[in-house]
Amino acid sequence: MAAADPPLPSDGGTPAPSPGVAPPAVRLPSPLVEVEEPALARYGVRLLLKRDDLIHPRLVGNKYRKLRLNLDAAAAAGHRTLLTFGGAYSNHLRATAAAGRLCGFATVGVVRGDELAGRPLNPSLAAAAADGMRLEFVDRATYRRKAEPEVLAALLDRHGPAYVLPEGGSNALAARGCADLGRELAGAADVVAVACGTGGTLAGLAAGLPAGAEAIGFAVLRGGSFLDADVARLQHAAFGGRRGRWRVEDRFHHGGYARTTPDLEVFADAFTALHGLPVERVYVAKMLYGVAALAREGAFAPGTRVAAVITG
């Protein structure tokens, strides 16, 4: 790994490296810090923050872990373009665009919702575009069919050959990359909590944890019970079968993806004020809120060490 980010074209520096150069300046293992959180401490539960948001300034959170092996595979297969999918506020689209810029790949983002095409870009999509991602907005019916061969063939016909990443970046290689997260927490935590959108991080995390530790995925989408089957499928593809102790909590979505509630806002603001950590609302706040709720329900025995993964 290089010691610092290479100059980017947008910075007036030299062009990005050829495809396959690993993203530089990664910080692994990510820091693990214990905090005194009253919502858990009153029940004798210890809270540790796994600061995956500090892995890389441009590829924050679980995104580096999920992309790392996929970038290697794309380069090995001779691809020069990454094509992937996401909603208007997708962290995955933003991270893929940044990875492409850093590692020398062109990037294409297929965005759910053709009604967005004529509107100003929100900060997430604007950041992806600034990193060179070509955005294509498709109607929601087509987006639901994005994995069907004829839809994918039409996309590749328009954009050229590409290494295709699924929505959220969750595939077998992503799960294998996230297994390192579990290994980094061996002996440090009894329970590990992580927010879940597509299940790839939970699938790998659980596989990497030692026997006896448990991973809990907090669904950020309404109706997140589908994640049970998706995580099991990802583990089968990545590891040949179910691995580790894990479960999905789908009660703390606060209305669905990218939605919030007054209770969530109050909780997140109080957490930030106490710990000095800005709490991202789409994923992290819901996970932390869920951990506090489980502690209140008596889900953790006194003395339990809960590591919360801060994905940024």
Image (tube, rainbow, N blue to C red):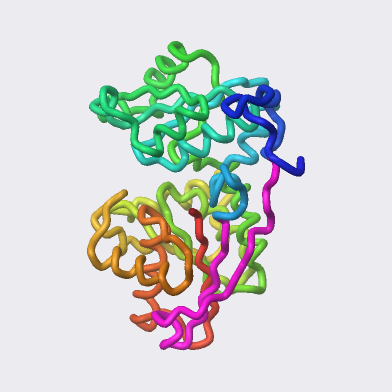
Q: Quadrant of the N terminus?
A: top right
Query: Residue 135 falls in which quadrant of the image?
Result: top left
Q: Is residue 207 above or below residue 48?
A: above
- Residue 48 in magenta? yes
Name the spot of residue 277 as percent of width and height, x first. 47, 64
Please report the residue visible at 31 percent of the width from the left and 49 percent of the height from the top. 258
Residue 25 is drawn in which quadrant? Answer: top right
Left or right placement of residue 7 versus residue 226 in this view: right
| As drawn, 71 above or below 194 | above
Question: In this figure, what is the number of numbered marks?
Answer: 0
Q: Is residue 115 left or right of residue 162?
A: left
- Where does residue 210 sit, x and y in percent of width and height? 64, 68
Magenta span of residues: 24-52
| Residue drawn where x is 51% and y is 25% of the image | 132
**Place of residue 204 in the rendered image (x, y in percent of width and height, measured from the top left):** 57, 53
Q: Residue placed at 44% from the left, 60% from the top?
A: 278
Mark yes or no: residue 236 visible: no
**Res 189 seen here:** yes
Q: Position of residue 109 (x, y in %)?
A: 44, 28
Q: Nearer the viewer, residue 23 or 225?
A: 23
Q: Examine the image and state in which quarter residue 122 appears.
A: top left
**Residue in the image at 65% along x and 55% along y:** 180
| Residue 290 in magenta stretch | no
Viewer-side residue, 49 vs 79: 49
Instruction: Tell me if 207 is positioned left or right of 40 in this view.
Output: right
Q: Nearer the viewer, residue 164 or 80?
A: 80
Residue 236 vs residue 4, the one in the foreground: 4
* Residue 66 position (above or below residue 163): below
